[in-house]
Amino acid sequence: MTNTLAPVPASTPGTQVDRPPAASRRTAAARSNRVLATFAFPSVIWYIIFTIGPLFAMFFIAFLSWRSLISTPTWAGWGNFTKFFQDERVGTAFRNTGIHMLATMPFQTAGAFMIGYFLSLRLPGHRIFRVVLFIPALISLAQLGTMFTVVLGSTGLVNSLLVSVGLERFQTAWLADTQTAMISLILVTIWSGTGFNAVLFSARLGSIDPDVYAAAELDGANHWQRLWRVAFPISIDYFGVITMLQYLWTLFGTAGMILILTQGGPGQATSTLSWLVYRFAFNDSSKLVGYSQAIGVVLFGLGVIGLGVIRSILRERH
């Protein structure tokens, strides 16, 4: 007796494996999305409360007449913004902000990029140099201010050095002289930020295939050409990110350094827009909280516009 097996039908091209119906797939996807939304919900609430909330509060307070944090605010409408465009102190701070930014950002972006390129070449001693460049990032803002107050004070290290080499006629109170206070602030900013950015750039440039540089070298490219015609186009998106971060820090983050070093003085010599936000809210006798937040709103607008411009110029184009 022979058993006959039914032939197995051969699969033909185009035959589809049985799949769950479309409705079941949609149900599973919806269930998965609900699970993800459940886990993301606390982060969303945190973001709304601690990011969107303060931002909304800044815009709201900018329309208030609020003399101090313990007084009762009243509605001021557009009065704070009208005052902003008529205040000579704002004009001076705006000019100082522009000077500070134009003087520091080229060193902290293009200069740091060039230093980072040579770090990425891994020349002898590059590890020690990398550590030295990173040291300013390990110093807190309070320590930084104290250190440079000692260095640039009227009896500080710089003046002592000038006396020791017979150049005592060049002595000055560097942070208290209207001619040198902004220059001193610029030099401190460059010293504190350039090395850190250079280390970041070296990490990005170190990921470029060495064969790319080798091919450029065979074509006769020198270091300068390899830097700007090879490394820069490859890492232009990262260059843009560092530039945007540096722009934001220069625009918003200088108030702390100014508070410790010069407090906006002498006179208005080192007063910037970010410093005015702090000064009018906490350090001014009139305590113009609403007015300080109006300046903050303008700063916010400048930040958004600046980021858009930098992003449009320094973006990946391939």
Image: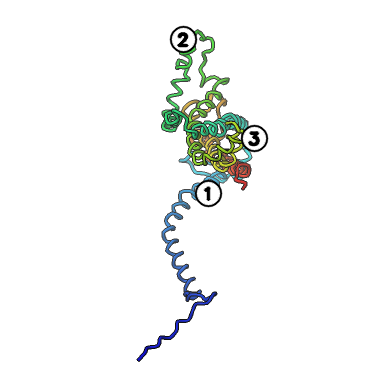
Camera-nearest residue between 220 and 224:
220
Residue at 44 percent of width and 61 percent of height: 36
Q: Disc 2 marks which residue?
A: 164
Q: Disc 3 marks which residue?
A: 86
Three-letter amino acid code at the position of disc 1: Phe
Q: Disc 1 marks which residue?
A: 56
When the figure is inspected, residue 305 is found, relative to residue 144, above or below; the finding is below
Camera-nearest residue between 75 and 20:
20
| Mark in the foreground, 3 or 1 | 1
Q: Find residue 299 and report its horizontal and vertical position in percent.
A: 57, 40
Q: Is residue 97 left or right of residue 138?
A: right
Q: Quadrant of residue 225?
A: top right
- SS at circle 3: helix
**Residue 153 visible in this rendered orientation of the protein:** yes
Return the disc, 1 or 2, that comes first in the chain's sequence: 1
Q: Find residue 297 and report its horizontal and vertical position in percent.
A: 57, 42
Q: Is residue 90 left or right of residue 119?
A: right
Return the disc, 3 or 1, that comes first in the chain's sequence: 1
Three-letter amino acid code at the position of disc 3: Gln
Q: Find residue 293 and report its horizontal and vertical position in percent.
A: 54, 41
When the figure is inspected, residue 227 is found, relative to residue 43, above or below; the finding is above
Q: Quadrant of residue 35?
A: bottom left
| Mark in the foreground, 1 or 2 | 2
Residue at 53 percent of width and 9 percent of height: 169
Q: Find residue 294 and report its horizontal and vertical position in percent.
A: 57, 41
**Residue 89 visible in this rendered orientation of the protein:** no
Q: Quick one: quadrant of the N terminus?
A: bottom left
Q: Residues within 10 Å of mark 1 (few under 14, many from 20)?
A: few
Three-letter amino acid code at the position of disc 2: Ser
